[in-house]
Amino acid sequence: LVLVLSTYPLENPRFATSYQYDPDVIFQIGFDLGGKGQFARRLTAQFSPLNNGAGSRQTFTITLPSGKTITGNVTQPTIHSTEPGPLVTEKDGVKVFAGQRDDPFFFDLVGFNRVVAKINATSVNGGPGTADPSLFTHTDAFAGFNVQTLVIEAPISDFVGGVRKFGMSAFSYRKVGPKLRADARTITFGTDT
């Protein structure tokens, strides 16, 4: 099974070396094995602080629900036109990549705004509103922006055991700071409370 988690959207490549994974955030992918929205198994990812400021090496630690732990280096971002080759860490049948990649989300923002404006203009005084798909420009508003991407490939049993039908959801938790609500969960690395 290959899992991809994209975070921190709209990273401008001109400032690539200033972006990093936040070491005070824990990322989790929860696996619902019973179809009830209860995540009985979790993959956890945590990132180290930069050891010498912008442009220095950052590491990750991934813990799979099966108990396997993989630690490796994040692919360093660059402002040069030639991107660095991806660093892929392999251990015990698990492959992990962490680093910047082109934002995969396509959105025609100009076209969307034109279509919404047309609907609003034609729905004045109780009219039905008319959508005109020809107003789309087919131009990706996010082209050229990056996201921080985490890719994990492992046997499906490392994620969900022998279960073949399951749900997934991704979460991010800030490790420090006060709870924002009385019912908010507190997360520490490796343990939920």
Image: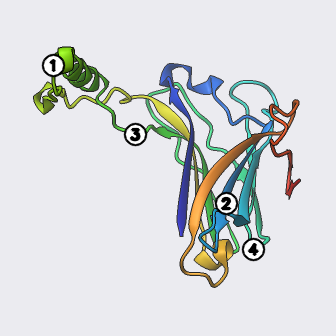
Residue 139 position, x and y percent, is: 24, 28
Picture quadrant where residue 169 is located: bottom right
Report the amino acid beneath label 2.
Gly
Give the mark nearest the N terminus, 1 or 3. Answer: 3
Q: CA distance from mark 4 to mark 3?
A: 31 Å
Residue behind mark 1 = 122
Residue behind mark 2 = 30
Dot 1: what SS? helix
Q: Nearer the viewer, residue 134 or 48?
A: 134
Q: Are marks 1 and 4 in contact (CB under 8 Å)?
A: no
Numbered tag placed on residue 105 in the rendering = 3
Q: Are marks 1 and 2 in contact (CB under 8 Å)?
A: no
Give the mark nearest the N terminus, 4 or 3. Answer: 4
Give the mark nearest the N terminus, 1 or 2. Answer: 2
Is residue 30 among the parts visible in the rendering? Answer: yes
Q: Are marks 4 and 3 in contact (CB under 8 Å)?
A: no
Residue behind mark 4 = 66
Q: Is residue 2 left or right of residue 123?
A: right
Report the amino acid beneath label 1.
Thr
Residue 100 position, x and y percent, is: 55, 38
Q: CA distance from mark 2 to mark 4?
A: 13 Å
Report the amino acid beneath label 3.
Phe
Q: Residue at x 69, y 36 (%)?
A: 21
The label nearer to you, 3 versus 2, is 2
Dot 2: what SS? strand
Q: Is residue 147 left or right of residue 114?
A: right
Category of crowding for the residue at label 2, using alpha-carbon neighbours closer than 10 angstroms: few (below 14), some (14–19), many (at least 20): many
The label nearer to you, 2 versus 4, is 2
Q: Residue at x 53, y 70 (%)?
A: 1
Is residue 152 among the parts visible in the rendering? Answer: no
